[in-house]
Image (tube, grey):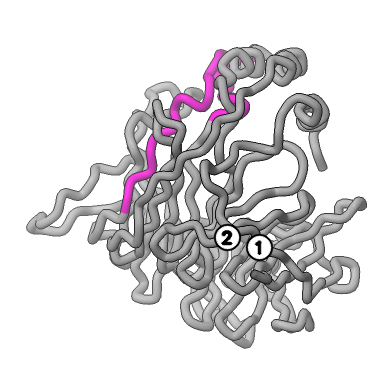
Amino acid sequence: MMSPLCRLLAATAMSVAPGGPALAQAPPALRLVRDLRIDAVQHDLSPIGFLAVAPNGTIAITQQQDRLVRFLDSTGTALGTFGRRGQGPGEFQHVGRLTWIDDTLVVSDRQQYRFTLISPDRKLVRTVLWLTNLSAPLPSEVDAPSARVVIPELLLGDRSQVVIASMGRLSMAPNVPSRPEEPSPVMRVDSGGVFRRLITRVPASDDCSVQVEGSRGGYVVMSIPYCFIPLEDVAADGSRFSLAHVEKAKNAYRVEVTRSSGEVAFARSYSYQPVAVPSAVRDSVKAAARAPAGRAAAEKIPDFFPPLSVILGGRDETTWIEMFSIVGDRTWQMLDDRGNPIGQLRVPRNVRIKVASRAAIWATETDDDGMQHIVRYRIVR
């Protein structure tokens, strides 16, 4: 459900801001034809988090409200569920990112710091603990970053893990969170936590939040509206890490796709036409901000809207970019395996793409009652 502040911003922006920044040269328009709709009521779907499609077409979705993973076949027929709330084997505190290792589903649980592996017949294969402490090979043959905080992203078939390391300074005061001060390395480490390969680096985003002292002690951190934070995604099969960030002092953003092997698939920059944040939007944000942290964040709104909202690694070496917008249809750009724009889609605003390929997209569709249905669209050229 949209918050009062979001409704206020959307209403204000509807009359003063266009849909979002546009590419200098738009790729060919593509058309969507819906060929599957999985009804939320019929299949008892609570709010959907992650969605992943197996090579054989099996659909897996996470339902955090129920702490389970629900499975359906490629026609939408229910296959069953896996998991429940708990701390034992096969139980979840948080059902997070889904990835596939061949026909085995891997579910990340960030509250229990582990991965759960599920077989094609929805049985527990095993659990694998997150790697939170890293070490360098001895004798050291590589320049391993000195990580302070490690966040696993995915488990690979050889039991190695892809992790993101925070390089921010850790505050001595317990109530003051750390802040990133330099790019965070994305690394591949073996099953014992030994550093093996630097995949890429995620630019720091410490200038997109403010930190003020709270009224009851401690500190409050507030995100700055419309400030662009680097976007990232891991392909559902774990093969690629996608990253998008704005190039400062240029009307361009950069997309970098790196394979889990460390090989760079492509790294390209794309120009776009910036859209200024109207004064009416700024005034609305400031008027709605009552707490000191909110007011401090409102004072730092950037001059322009961000160019992008989402990056998504496609199933067939494609990369998908959602252009930023406040109202109207969502506009997505499809890039090929070398980063060439090959198509543009306009998607209804109540549709959120979860999985994409050249031939089709899988998404959630939210109706007027807030129910989330699963839909699949064929892409027509």
Q: Is residue 223 magenta?
A: yes
- Residue type at mark 1 is Leu
Residue at coordinates 65% horizontally, 65% vertically from top-left?
A: 51
Q: Describe residue 14's horizontal placement relative to residue 176 as left or right.
A: right
Q: Which residue is mark 1?
A: 30
Q: Position of residue 279 (x, y in %)?
A: 69, 15
Residue at coordinates 19% horizontally, 54% vertically from top-left?
A: 136
Q: Position of residue 53 (x, y in %)?
A: 61, 74
Over which residues does the magenta segment extend?
200-227
Residue at the left extreme of this rendering:
139
Q: In this rendered view, identify the residue nearer to me: 339 or 114.
A: 339
Q: Is residue 378 visible?
A: yes
Q: Is residue 82 magenta?
A: no
Cα–Cα span, label 1 and label 2: 6 Å
Other-residue count near label 2 (Cα within 10 Å), few / some / many at <14 / 14–19 / ≥20: some
* Rendered image quadrant of residue 301: top right
Residue contact at pointers 1 and 2, CB within 8 angstroms:
yes
Q: Which mark is residue 343?
A: 2
Viewport quadrant of the N terminus: top right
Q: Secondary structure at mark 1?
A: loop
* Rendered image quadrant of residue 278: top right
Q: Position of residue 4 (x, y in %)?
A: 82, 29
- Residue type at mark 2 is Gly
